[in-house]
Amino acid sequence: MGKYFKEGRREKGEGRKIFYFFLSSILYLLFFGFYGCAVKPYHSQTRLIMGTVMEIVAQDEKAIEAAFKEIEHIDDLMSNYKPESEISRLNKDGQVKASPETLAVVKASKKLFRFSEGAFDITVGPLIKLWNVKGNMQKDASLIRIPGEGKIKEALSCVGTNFIDIDEKNSIIRLKKKSVILDLGAIAAGYAVDRAIAVLKQNGVRNALVNAGGEIYCLGKKGFSYWKVGLQNPRKKDGVADIVKLRNRAVATSGDYEQFFVYENKRYAHIIDPRTGYPVDNGIISVSVFADDCTTADALGTAIFVLGKEKGEQLAKRFKNVEVKIITK
Ligand code: AMP
Ligand code: MG
């Protein structure tokens, strides 16, 4: 009996030792696993795609490569500068068999056209061509010509998302009128950011930042803290208007400070009001939209810029989890 008791006590003591051994091992693994993950170096890579600087920050270089490939794939589908893109072929031939990606973006654009009562309109292409803001930015002021009323009216007659027809069953997009030109410049970059984030996640990445020239998504955290994003000061080059902390959230900014030209002391920026045919001039100089995905943030930013402060804020309220920061003149 005594022996049994003695041995029993010894077994109990060993059990406790084993228990503490396992506990400390688990704590050790947890601590160093977590710490190791947090301090593993971040890689930041930038590339020029979609006519803008694309930046991806993450800890896995192979995943970054895969995400850039996805962004290039989106550009191959939606660019207006690549003659073989689906959008270029649609603009040229009046119809195209579209990929699920292009269909998704055009469908989202149609929805926002309705919600914004025509302020957001991807058929703005003829007006973009006419105002040629990108081209005029490079020119000497004396060479800039402002389009006349007649030309604006002519372009306006080909503007309207109702000219886009989607044949869901056969994945075909058709343009119902000749000379209609789609331009996905207000939404494609945000969509590319979302696709890049999806690819990073598929590769096991849990913390990353993707920035497509100001359209940004922050996945997880950077180390122990939220990602910090500086919002551009619209009137100070390289100046920061605000610093925001984000986690699993997108922010996109539309402004009049990057693409514009000045003619007779007046600023003409690249966002056009499709209802008037003229570059927006409503007192807003910058709109930042925070949302759960970057497609919504990007498109909504442009829509609010056109609608103006009051109507823009009303539109934002119709979307879940959306916040807006507007800077006026
Ligand atoms: P963002 O910088 O995201 O606001 O996008 C601006 C770009 O969207 C322009 O360069 C045009 O390609 C396109 N765009 C301009 N005006 C509009 C509009 N009212 N609706 C949709 N896209 C537009
Ligand atoms: Mg936009």
Image: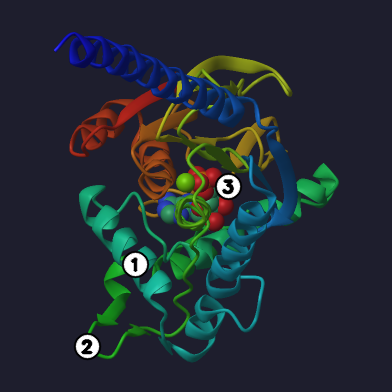
Q: Nearer the viewer, residue 55 or 155?
A: 55
Pick whichever, 251 or 263, lies toward us: 251
Marks 2 and 1, how far apart in space? 14 Å
Q: Residue at x 52, y 67 (%)?
A: 126
Q: Quadrant of residue 233?
A: top right
Q: Residue flagged by tag 1: what amino acid is it? A: Ala
Q: Is mark 3 within 8 Å of ligand 1?
A: yes
Which residue lies under the disc numbered 2?
Answer: 169
In the structure shown, which secondary structural element does the residue marked by tag 1 occupy?
A: helix
Disc 3 to disc 1: CB gap under 8 Å? no
Q: Position of residue 65 (x, y in %)?
A: 67, 58
Residue type for callout 2:
Lys
Q: Which residue is mark 3?
A: 270
Q: Which residue is mark 1?
A: 104
| SS at badge 3 | loop
**Measured from the top left, where is residue 280 in percent x and y?**
47, 40
Residue shown at 40% from the left, 24% from the top? 22
Badges 2 and 1: C-beta atoms under 8 Å apart? no
Specify whether 68 is left or right of 255: right
Q: From what the image shows, is residue 76 above or below residue 262?
A: below
